[in-house]
Amino acid sequence: MADRKRDWGVWLLALYLVTLGISHGVRRIHRAPFEPRAESRQIDVQTVAGDERSAGETRLVYTDRGPRDDPSAPVIVMLHGSPGSKEVFDGVTPLLTETHRILAVDLPGFGESAAWVPDYSIAAHAEYVGQLLDRLDIPRAHLVGFSMGGGVALEFYDERPRQVESLVLISAIGVQELELFGRYDLNHAVHGAQLSAIWMAQEGLPHMGLLDGVFLGRPYARNFYDTDQRPLREILERFEPPLLVLHGRNDFLVLPEAAEEHHRIVPQSELVMTDSDHFMVFREPAETAGELRRWFDRVAIGEAPHRADATASRLAAAARPWDPASAPPFIGAALLIALSLIVLATFVQEDLACIATGLMIAQGRVGWLAGGLACFLGIFLGDLLLFFAGRWLGRAAVRRAPLRWFIRDEQIDISSRWFELKGPMVIFVSRFIPGTRLPTYFTAGVLKTRFLWFATYFFMAVAIWTPLLVFCAVLLGERAMFWFEGLRRWLLPGTALLGLWMFIVVRVVVPLFSWRGRRMWRGRWLRWTHWEFWPPWLFYPPVILYLVYLGVRYRGPLLFTSTNPAMPASGFVAESKWQILQGLSDAGASIAKTGWIPAGGEAHERSAIVATFMQANSLDYPVILKPDAGQRGSGVAVIRSDDEVQSYFETMTSAALVQEFIEGHEFGVFYYRRPGDETGQIFSITDKTIPEVIGDGVHTVEQLILRDSRAVALADRYLAAQAKRLSQVLHDGERLPLVQLGTHCRGAIFRDGRSLGGEELTREIDRISKTYDGFYFGRYDVIVPDAAALSSGTGIRVIELNGVTSEATHIYDPRISVFEAWRTLFEQWRLAFEIGAANREAGVKPASIGQLIRLALDYRAHSRSHSGVN
């Protein structure tokens, strides 16, 4: 059932990806050509990116109405808001063109101007407007800025003060303190979340172009995200020309108090408050045009004052600093929008959102209950989203590379049980440590844990944390933001140091207070001080350097791939164990009975092949199942029932072998023969012993493993292998094998068995080897009744033959030093190159780099198909 669900998931994902690709193709092919309106005009201006103009060009569209041929006619530049276009002024413009030349501009990203530019900020838009006036040779103009266009007009003045005759702000933005939450960082976070949602909808949904060009599209979101309103207060405070502030008392998008603040800090300004709302410019065009006519007439006759004409009382009022207590409370639709934005802001930066909400509560803009609930709801929903992200994405991620190389299902199960035991403490601690919540809650979702259980603790943690943070912000006021900024500045190094300290405490200090912890540390010490347990990256560099030397000496870095012509690349990787055993088939009863199971097919079909093989060879359980192209014992299992066969093939889909289970003792016999020699030689013999613990009727299996002087070094491996029996107490004298297979990476004990060699063994291995034409170098894994039988060359049953990458595994005997091990491997590889060189002289070509890469990729594909088999 789980496999069927995964298959449906794969098909749905494939369908989504295909549909999304078609949608992107349709959008690209059917992108509508630009067709301007009859009255529109177009120029190409230099593209603006940040503070500079780039080499590219951007289409700028505008209308030019009124007495264009009269150089004495005053010019008015109309700047729309976001989202919007020059058409918002269509009702106002005709009422002014009799005496004024009207330029209405589509700012880039809107209307008929270019939709895609690198910078959508009001500062960039002001630069585009400046280029337009330069191209039209207009030295001075009146500016009318509606909504976001007011910010564009102010930025234009900041860059070109001499070109501004006067300015009219209609329902316009301005000071940052009265925009949304009153803080740039929080507003920026909200706009970032909005932009992300719009981008994901337009690019991640297969809409076939239906969402392109929507009113609240990406240019609108980018305009707000790219814009920084913090400089606008300073620009207003030093604004010199005449200024008219025209605003509606019922404006809930830009608060009337913002207009009053603009009027206060510009002492020469005139404030006109109407009974309209934010959209007076196109809902009430006649009234708006009337106010504009009156204003421009006053400017023309010199009645509109400049800053130098302001009264002393207005100058004194303008000099007073901003009082946060003067910010109005949110009510009605404005309150609903503010609370919704608080919820949204917590998804981006929950601590900052709580602090900003606390400041708004302290200022009287939001009530205690409303603000606290908005923060609580946003944080709780965000925690659940993190949990479900881990549940839906994380579990799938750990089943795929690269995570599955490091995380096994049993590790997840162990962590899940630990998390359920320690979860409440982890959740509460992470709630109070910045930077730890995302990984903690995502991990909670990845692990196989109960949703309602975690949701309850999420709820409790948020219910404690949120009111506490909001209350502190109310109590501390602006100092809370100052401290928060300091915390953010030191958050990364502080979190790193805290994480390092917690790691040391949890992984080093705490375990030392228990016997189990001290024994586990003993095992880690042994793994680092005994080279037998070293990781490959630590042990093999000298061997790799020697291989480079041999490649230079023998004039062929891949010459070793000619050592065994009978095997692909001499058995370097991905060689078929079945084909090798077939090559040895003339050796008769010396080769273990083995059957081949092709890749693919249903589990029950492959199980039937095993049953047929067992019946044909008069075998009973146990049998061995292993991948045809396995390496270092991966995927090999001792199977003891029909159910285990079925279970094995539910996770393993590559080609496999079924092999008789042979009682006896396993040895590794490394053999080589130079081409042209009549007899070969035994290079290495490894005595493989399955580790075991012996019960005493007192201690559990776990305690016996940890008490053993050698087993403790591989305690992690043995404890995982015996996970179901760890608490069992063995009878006195009862023996328990810790692993089933004689592979060193699984924990088997290897001893130097070279003393068991002799003429009889060499003669028998030579006989077997010569039945496989083209084989000269490799290691046999054999099972014999006992060591004496091996020495006499009798009763040998070959279960596997490995090629050129075989190792003389006797080196893993604890009595052998790392230097002797390196010398042995040097000699082994020298022989491989020597035999390869002789075969090259006989016409055998070494494999190419491309062939080795293909073999490695093929092996990787096979290893993925049996990665779940242990």
Image (cartoon, rainbow, N blue to C red):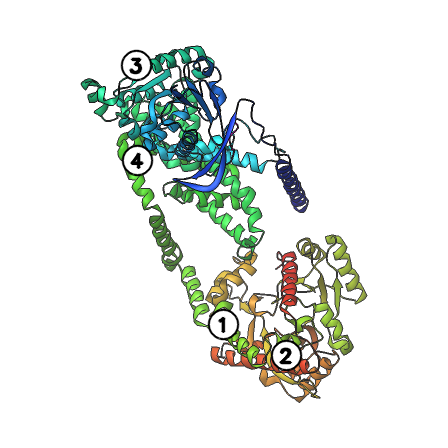
Instruction: Decide if residue 559 is in sight here.
Output: yes
Q: Tag 1, which secondary structure?
A: helix
Give amino acid for label 1: Pro
Tag 2–tag 4 contact (CB < 8 Å): no
Quadrant including the C terminus: bottom right
Q: Can you tell which quarter of the image residue 508 is in?
A: bottom left
Looking at marks 2 and 4 on the same chain, the residue that comes earlier in the sequence is marked by: 4
Task: Please say whether residue 294 is one of the residues in the magenta stretch.
Answer: no
Q: Where in the figure is residue 854, as x and y percent of width and height?
A: 65, 63
Q: Residues within 10 Å of mark 4 (few under 14, many from 20)?
A: some
| Residue wearing tag 4 | 481
Which of the labelled discs sits on residue 541, or is there none? 1
Front disc: 3 or 4 = 3
Q: Where in the figure is residue 624, as x and y percent of width and height?
A: 69, 65
Which of the labelled discs sits on residue 669, or is there none? 2
Looking at marks 3 and 4 on the same chain, the residue that comes earlier in the sequence is marked by: 3
Looking at marks 2 and 3 on the same chain, the residue that comes earlier in the sequence is marked by: 3
Residue at the location (58% across, 73% down)? 689
Q: As displayed, is residue 481 above or below residue 446? A: above
The Cα atoms of the two marked residues, 2 and 1, are separated by 25 Å
Q: Tag 2, which secondary structure?
A: strand
Looking at marks 2 and 1 on the same chain, the residue that comes earlier in the sequence is marked by: 1
- Relative to residue 338, is residue 487 drawn left or right? left
Q: Residues within 10 Å of mark 1 (few under 14, many from 20)?
A: few
Q: As displayed, is residue 689 above or below residue 383? A: below
- Relative to residue 861, is residue 202 drawn left or right? left
Q: Residue furthest right?
A: 616
| Residue wearing tag 3 | 301
Looking at marks 3 and 1 on the same chain, the residue that comes earlier in the sequence is marked by: 3
Give amino acid for label 3: Ile
